[in-house]
Every structure is written in structure tokens, then in C-alpha cells.
Image: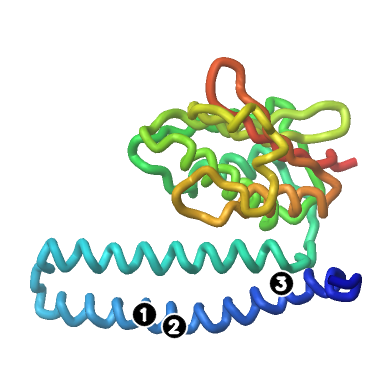
Amino acid sequence: MNNTDNKDKPSLLKQMSSVVSHEIRNPLAIISNSIYFIKTKLAAGGTVLDPKIAKHIGIIEGEVKHSNDVIEEMLNFTRTRELRCAPAAVNSAIKDLAASYLLPPSITLKAVADPADPCVNADMEAVCYAMRCVLDNAVQAMPEGGTLILEATHDDKMAHMTVIDSGNGLPGGDGEKVFEPFFTTKPRGIGLGLTIARKFLEQQGGTAKAENAPGRGAAVTLSLPLNG
């Protein structure tokens, strides 16, 4: 394969992702709307929905959401995000995230604020998306349940947001491998979440690292330069 072919790969991947997104998202939207129509008709007149029907409708809705999430990951992986940075408090970010993130009943989440309440200049929408990717990965690492800690800290130059889970830790203890595109040990998912998280942080002068936590589990830390 010649050099021109190699140079074209990123643009072809980006184009392919956009085409796939369009061609799959439209049918998914139709499916979602149709399910809503069916649920409305079945519940007309106050009728109680048959539990088996409700179960299968829930399965369809879950699969539609999963498919849309995969498409979103593909687009975030291939697109260059236009950053909109503004001053933001790290404690507020982790507090809001902890309050809004939906957890399985078997997992508890504890948010630990930094007493100094460090401030960063960042696109917090991108940062929160990255943090959600990290939380998703941590939840998947604890299929039997456990505890999550979302902690804010800082040093002389950087503010840190760390997610610590109580799972089995990193495969082989390799903290870099988990950031490789398409690397996953899970039965579902395409392995782009942590790759995207690092990409969004590096675009803002930050870093992302993963390591085994003391005792048990893994710790993933997203860091951003302190404001001022």
C-alpha cells in the first residue's frame, strides 16, 4: 500500500463514520418513534400493559439506546471537537456529575470534593463527557456491584478528577493499554470510551492516566491545567 493510501485512512474513517451514523440513526429514530406509538396505544384508556410486552418493549428501547451510544462514540473518536472553554470549578463539576449519573442499584457512588475547590479553564461539556466515559468503564468493571469514588484533588499545576472502582483492576496492570482504540475486555462495547476521554483532555492541555488502585480496583485520573 502506498503512502497516499495511508494518509487517506483517517479521512476515510471519518467519512465512513458519518455515513454509518446517518444510515443507522435514521432507522433507529423510526424504531424509537414506533415504540412510543405502540406504548401509547397499548396504554390507551388506562389499560395495564402486559408484563411480557412491557419487558420486550424495554429490551427494544435499551438496544436502541446502546446503538445510539455506539454511534456517538464513533463520531467523537473521528471528529475534531471545537472547544468552548470557560472558567469552571472542579468541585461543582464532580458534584453535578455524581448527582446526574444513573447507577445500577448494586453500585454506590461517593463524591469527594477538594477543600481548595480548584478552578480550570475548560470545555466542561467535553470534560463531563470524558468523565462519563470513565464512569461507564468503571461500572462495567463491577458486574457484581461495588463502590465508586469520584474524587477531586490538585497539585501545583493541575486539577485532577479521579474515578476509583472496586473491580478486579487493570488487565495485566497495564494502564496504557486501556486507552488504545478498540481495546475492551467487556462482552459489549467497542472500546473507544477511554480513548475519547484522553483525546478530549489532551485537546485542552490535560492528561489521562490509569493505574491499579491500592488494594483493589482501578483508578483513572483526568487532569487539567489550573486556571491562572
> Of residues 46 and 200, which is closer to you in this image?
200
- The answer to the question of whether label 3 and label 1 lie on touching residues, with beta carbons closer than 8 A, is no
Residue corresponding to mark 2: 27
* Residue on which the image places disc 3: 13
Give me the C-alpha separation between circle 3 and circle 1.
27 Å
Q: Quadrant of the N terminus?
A: bottom right
Q: From the viewer's perspective, tell me whether residue 201 is left or right of residue 164.
A: right
Amino acid beneath label 1: Ile
The residue that appears at 27% across and 63% down in the rendered structure is 58
* CA neighbours of label 3 inside 10 A, class few (<14), some (14 to 19), many (20+): some
- Residue 37 lies, in percent from the top left, at 27, 82
Q: Is residue 129 visible?
A: no
Q: Residues within 10 Å of mark 2 (few under 14, many from 20)?
A: few
Q: What residue sits 25% from the left and 68% below the top?
A: 57
Give coordinates of residue 16: x percent, y percent. 66, 77
Is 34 situated above or below 146?
below
